[in-house]
Image (cartoon, rainbow, N blue to C red):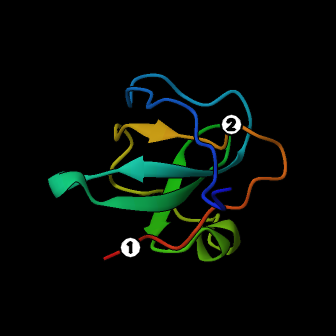
Amino acid sequence: MSSAPAYTRWYPGTVKPARPGVYQRRGGNNVHTYSYWTGAYWCFSHERADKAAMDNSYPSISQEKPWRGLARPGAQPQAVQP
């Protein structure tokens, strides 16, 4: 059995999440990071979801990156692999 989280499909950056929280985002060169969605804007990106959860005050300059969330309740995001 795999311990990898079950993510949703990727959504285009023009579609915004329905609920605030940490989501995985895809940037240039297909690099994946985590950002907090406040319900109004995306915050700075981080390599780890726990860091993104704590940094929810400052808007990111990139508001249109594709994103995805966790598909299962209780699934744990993993650190982004370099």
In percent of the image, x 64 and y 64: which residue is there? 56
Which residue sits at x=34%, y=55%? 61
The amino acid pointed to by label 2 is Ala
Along the line of sight, the residue nearer the viewer: 75 or 25: 75
| 7, above or below 32, in the image | above
Q: CA distance from mark 2 to mark 1?
A: 20 Å
Q: Quadrant of residue 11?
A: top left
Residue at the extreme right of the image, as rendered:
74
x%, y% of residue 32? 37, 58
Q: Is residue 53 left or right of residue 73?
A: left
Q: Position of residue 8 (x, y in %)?
A: 57, 33
Say which element carries label 1. Answer: loop
Among the two numbered marks 2 and 1 on one chain, the one whose residue lies closer to the N terminus:
2
- Of residues 41 and 7, which is closer to you in this image? 7
Q: Dot 1: few (<14), some (14–19), or many (≥20) neighbours within 10 Å?
A: few
Q: Which residue is mark 2?
A: 71
Residue designated by label 1: 81
Amino acid type at mark 1: Gln
Q: With 72 as the anchor, is 68 left or right in this view? A: left
Q: Are marks 2 and 1 in contact (CB under 8 Å)?
A: no
Which image quarter is the N terminus in?
bottom right
Q: Quadrant of residue 16?
A: top right
Give coordinates of residue 22: x percent, y percent. 64, 54
Look at 60% across and 41% down and name the residue there: 69
